[in-house]
Amino acid sequence: MNGLMIQGTSSGAGKSFITTGLCRHLSNMGIKVCPFKSQNMSTNSTLTHDGLEIASAQAVQAQAARLTPEAFMNPVLLKPRNDCSSEIVLNGKTFAHSMSEYRNFAQTEGISAVRQALAHIAGNFEAVIIEGAGSPAEINLNASEIVNMRIAREANVPVVLVADVDRGGSLAAVVGTLALLGDDRERVKGIIYNMFRGDISLFDDAVKWTENYTGVKVLGVVPFVKGVKIPEEDSLIRRGAEIYGEHETVSTLTDIDYAFDEIARVLSDSLDIDYILRLIHREGTTPQQM
């Protein structure tokens, strides 16, 4: 199917930010784009128009794409109750209150719901922007995961890897992640360095080194953005003034619509959008037989 998957070297790398911005940018171009996250773990949820429950992050991304939020955009939602227990929400409805059978659930009802959602998106949209969760290099989770490379394979889409420069160690995070991906490494077609403070030209050598060492194209360096605040997972996007208490709360539809357009503008200015469009609309791509 036509689309792209945004994965991160860690939680909080900015996957939701990039996904949201790309959804708005593609929508501005007149492309019927759908956001998708197969499985989200979050206590922040939203009810859709028909009373189904999805993660707030995917509802926000739907708004960015100028769509009504729907359950198929987030078929599996895990709502933590404590350190050892989560409620499982499947297709917008409570499925179970225990994680004890999660591995079996993920490989049966979970992946079945994900495949149905992807088939629906492939038949009704021109493109999909898929968000991963955490890191795709969690080797201990590979056998049962239904949210990172497993989903990139199911949808047959390329992957862009996002790293957070602000937290430090981003080059090592990129190289280490790629080293642990095995055969899935070939699916990674681009790298985005996110949340850079200051003069971006100072990072030019890092970009050149990354491309020479990994052989993967760096699509751009996204600056640390102040004054933009949208929901992401269990907390707000850790960007710009928010850390220092300078962020203004987005309280109206006008405010959040401005935020979407501002994020899209930043990504358009920072990234190789033409290359991203070529990744999304690959010649000869067809929806995978589910």
Image (tube, rainbow, N blue to C red):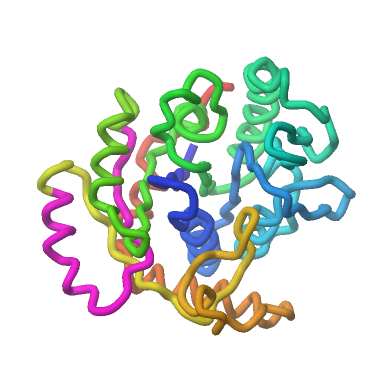
Q: Is residue 207 left or right of residue 119?
A: left
Which quadrant of the structure image shows residue 257?
bottom right
Which residue lies at the image location 51% right of the left edge and 31% below the top edge?
Answer: 151
Is the C terminus in the top left, top right, bottom left or bottom right quadrant? top right
Give yes or no for residue 139 being in the magenta stretch.
no
Q: Is residue 230 left or right of residue 161?
A: right
- 119 versus 195 height, above or below: above
- 290 versus 212 height, above or below: above
Tag count in the figure? 0
Q: How far across and down, in percent of the image, does residue 16 sit?
A: 53, 56
Give yes or no for residue 190 being in the magenta stretch.
yes
- Which residue reaches farthest right? 51
Q: How far across and down, in percent of the image, does residue 180 sit?
A: 31, 29
The answer to whether one can see residue 182 in this image is yes
Which residue lies at the image location 62% right of the left edge and 83% below the top edge?
Answer: 248
Q: Is residue 15 left or right of residue 273?
A: right
The magenta span reads 187-211
For the residue pair 263 and 171, the one nearer the viewer reads as 171
- 68 versus 216 height, above or below: below
Which residue lies at the image location 16% right of the left edge and 42% below the top edge?
Answer: 215
- Which residue reaches farthest front? 83
The answer to whether one can see residue 30 in this image is no
Q: How far across and down, in percent of the image, does residue 243 sit?
A: 51, 73
